Amino acid sequence: MNRSQLIQEIKNKASFLCVGLDTDIKKIPSHLLSETDPVFEFNKAIIDATKDHCVSYKINTAFYESMGSKGWETMERTLNYIPKNIFTIADAKRGDIGNTSDMYARAFFENLSFDSVTLAPYMGKDSIAPFFNYENKWGIVLALTSNSGSEDYEQKSIGDEKLYERVIKTTCEIGNISNLMFVVGATKAEELANIRKIIPKHFLLVPGVGAQGGSLSDVAKFGMNEDCGLLVNASRSIIYAGNEKDFAQKAKAEAQNINDEMKILLKQFGII
């Protein structure tokens, strides 16, 4: 999916919601466990319930890789079930020496056909460069994450700048606004103002709204640009909104509540 298609989808749905399909088989409703592929059946129901209220799905590959080859098949089935007009993210946090990253890029862009992959940039530019060789595919680079450990490295100062600032500036040398996004945690919303000074036009993937306590209005206040420029992810607060047979309906209601707030914000900022 290219940039203009993503922006149009945001306007069409009046939403910049990304739903995280970080599905843990230990947390899905028990009535699904008798199914041949319970995680897929859960994901399918969540997608059917939320697809009108979101513009993106983020699949955290660890939840599928932990189940071995069957989990990989479930991830592929889930990806193929997602409507083609919805932006897909492989939350895999890859990044390695060049030839290895080239293979990772092939795996997620050629074999699985994700629109994007999250990347860990700390081995340097060459470790993520192969992901930017694909047309209409995106690399989503970790910049300032919402976990407490972000203080260990990302927020440390290097001379007169912080490490995450260096990461953003350096990565912009290999990507552009049409194929490069950055991860910025919603719990670091006030830092978004500083980040927007560095990258005013890039899209940002913002986890941490919902179960992690990030504020959607603060994210919009500090991070929204003229194209919206945000994909705000919510995972647990949506997919685990219910744990009975009506789990999908409850997920839909939660997604719609977030979508309603997003619509107000998009109007407020003149996006729609």
Image: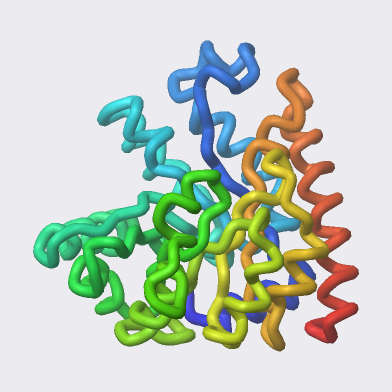
x then y, percent, for residue 187: 67, 54
- Up the image or down, 7 lies above or below 207; here it is below
Counting from the top left corner in percent of width and height, residue 41 is at: 55, 30
Colouring: rainbow
Q: Is residue 139 above or below residue 152?
A: below
Q: Quadrant of residue 269?
A: bottom right
- 132 to 187, vertically: above or below: below
Image coordinates for residue 142, horizontal then vertical, percent: 43, 61
Is 24 displayed left or right of 65 in the figure? right
Task: Tell me which corner region of the image, top left, top right, bottom left or bottom right, holds residue 140.
Answer: bottom left
243 horizontally vs 175: left or right: right
Viewer-proximal residue, 2 or 99? 99
Horizontal relation, residue 237 to residue 74: left or right = right
Q: Residue 177, position in %: x, y?
A: 48, 85
Residue 266 in view here:
yes
Instruction: Kindly tell me whether residue 80 is visible in this rendering.
Output: no
Residue placed most toward the observer, 157 or 109: 157
Q: Is residue 199 above or below residue 60?
A: below
